[in-house]
Amino acid sequence: MSDAPANPIQDEDPPPVEDAAEDGGVRGALIRYGIGLVLATGLSAGSFLLPSTGLVYAPALPVALVVMAIAQMGVHLVFFLHITTGPDNTNNVLALAFGVLIVFLIMAGSLWIMANLNHNMMSMTQIMSMQR
Amino acid sequence: MSAAADPRPLGGNRADRRGPSTGAGRDGPASTRIVVGFGFWIFLLSDIVMFSAFFAAYAVLAGATAGGPSGLQLFDLKSVAWETGCLLLSSFACGVASVGATLKSFRIFQIAMAATFVLGALFLGLEIKEFVGLVARGAGPQRSAFLSAFFALVGCHGLHVTIGLLWLLTMMAQVQSKGFREDIQRRILCFNLFWHALDIIWVGVFTIVYLLGAGL
């Protein structure tokens, strides 16, 4: 019974968790930033150089570029913003998932609706000929 | 431990605690650092949602050049590559500054923040040079819907970088005058999140606007 707290909700803050001190210390933190920099540089350089190399079938180029961009965003999230699967990150990951959903809905929804509108819209020349 | 004791008291059993609370609700309230980081993360996500609306507008209007110049004729990918490099290195320098703040080392923190500022200002300078060049060629935001969307999206990102640079200088001054206090450390954390999030948005900008735009 002695270890059951009288007031279970803590009033004082526990000492802050230094995110560099969690695993590997300062060295580990620097190494993580370094890995992130190398990966992000590689993906950026790849995105810029890919169109001129001709390694990718030209019509597939936009998809390849978008995939590399998403990969680089992942690298930034993990190595720079320290989004992890750790227990202190559950809330951040859930908020991120919701944000990604909204971003997807806005982007894909706008493109879909506008493409559909353009498709169904009468062309300007047809409208002109009807007015005559 | 008597049998009558509640094994799962509200806010968690202190005996079960494995360390500081994680904010997952099991071990009582999280530390202020985690709460502040979470709150700022929510703000950043709302900012990203706002940017996604600008991205959607650009993607819809990218072909609406109204007989004016298209992205293929306007964009100078070499300058964009330099901008990307500047922003990426400044993001790394910002990370080094956060390590300096953890170590409470004024020298590492201030030098890394100064490097972040110089690289960020270089990025901004290149972007302003590009904008001035476009307007001088008659390709200002009033030329076509495509250019309106372009200036709105890229200009909004540039505005964020400008605000970030002002914030960066404020943090350097605050650390110099107040030291690495708890609240200053939390502000440094928020600034770090902000700066890295700007880099994430730039990844979207250079891919969707410049690389795909130049390929259209």
Image (cartoon, rainbow, N blue to C red):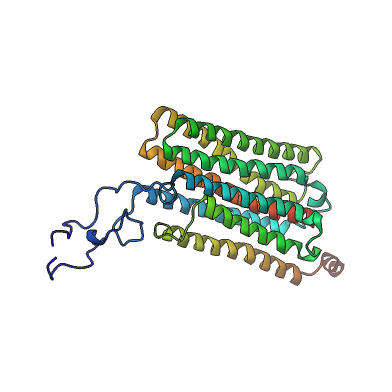
Residue B66 or residue B130, whichever sits in front: B130
In this rendering, does residue B46 appear at all?
A: no
Q: Residue at 76%, 44% (x, y): give it.
A: B78
Residue B207 placed where, x, y %? 69, 54
Figure disc tally: 0
Quadrant position of the C terminus of chain B in the picture: bottom right
Q: Is residue B92 left or right of residue A122?
A: left
Residue B45 placed where, x, y %? 51, 54
Q: Is residue B190 left or right of residue B4?
A: right
Q: Residue at 58%, 65% (x, y): give it.
A: A105
Residue A29 placed where, x, y %? 49, 47
Residue B153 vertical position relative to residue A4 in the rendered view, above or below: above
Q: Residue at 50%, 38% (x, y): give it.
A: B97
Q: Residue at 24%, 50% (x, y): give it.
A: A11
Residue A62 vertical position relative to residue B96 in the rendered view, above or below: below
Residue A19 or residue A58, whichever sits in front: A19
Residue B180 placed where, x, y %? 39, 35
Q: Name the quadrant containing residue B91.
A: top right
In this rendering, does residue A6 appear at all?
A: yes
Residue B106 vertical position relative to residue B57 in the rendered view, above or below: above
Q: Name the quadrant containing residue A2.
A: bottom left
Quadrant position of the N terminus of chain B in the picture: bottom left
Residue A61 or residue B140, whichever sits in front: A61
